[in-house]
Amino acid sequence: MKANSEKTKQSKKATRRVLAGVLCGASVLSLVLSLVMPPISQAIANDAQTVPTEETVMGGFLKWVY
């Protein structure tokens, strides 16, 4: 009988450790993503604004030629 209760206690401790590890990992991942994503989003937005389209390049080229 004592062996079963010992196993149950150990199982509960292991479950708590795993759960605590998962929650801690999720918190760290959330923090890292919140720090990393805004600069990435800003960089993508800046690239989208500065990438010339074919029309603007050709329009500017034609202005210089004629």
Image (cartoon, helix red, strand yellow):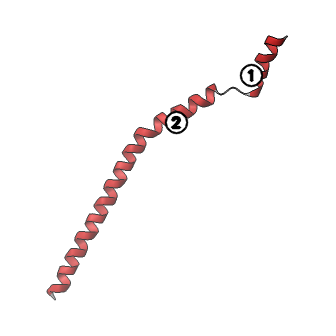
State the CA–CA distance, disc 2 to disc 1. 24 Å
Q: For the point 62% across and 25% down, which residue is it?
A: 50
Residue sticking out furthest to the front: 65
Residue type at tag 1:
Thr
Numbered disc total: 2
**Displayed quadrant of residue 3:** bottom left
Q: Is residue 54 left or right of residue 26?
A: right
Q: Residues within 10 Å of mark 2 (few under 14, many from 20)?
A: few
Q: Position of residue 34 (x, y in %)?
A: 41, 41
Q: Is residue 24 left or right of residue 37?
A: left
Residue at the spot of label 2: 41
**Displayed quadrant of residue 53:** top right
Query: Up-down: is 44 above or below 1?
Result: above
Foreground residue among 66 and 28:
66
Query: Up-down: is 6 above or below 15?
Result: below
Mark 2 / mark 1, whichever is N-terminal: 2
Q: Name the element at disc 1.
A: helix
Residue sticking out furthest to the right: 66
Q: Residues within 10 Å of mark 1 (few under 14, many from 20)?
A: few
Q: For the point 79% across and 22% down, which residue is it?
A: 58
**Displayed quadrant of residue 51:** top right
Residue type at tag 2:
Ser
Asked if the residues shown at circle 2 and circle 1 are in contact, with their CB atoms under 8 angstroms apart, the answer is no
Q: Position of residue 48 (x, y in %)?
A: 62, 31
Q: Quadrant of the N terminus?
A: bottom left
Query: Up-down: is 17 above or below 59?
Result: below
Residue at the spot of label 1: 56
Q: For the point 34% across and 59% down, which residue is it?
A: 22
Q: Name the element at disc 2.
A: helix
Q: Quadrant of the C terminus?
A: top right
Residue sticking out furthest to the left: 2
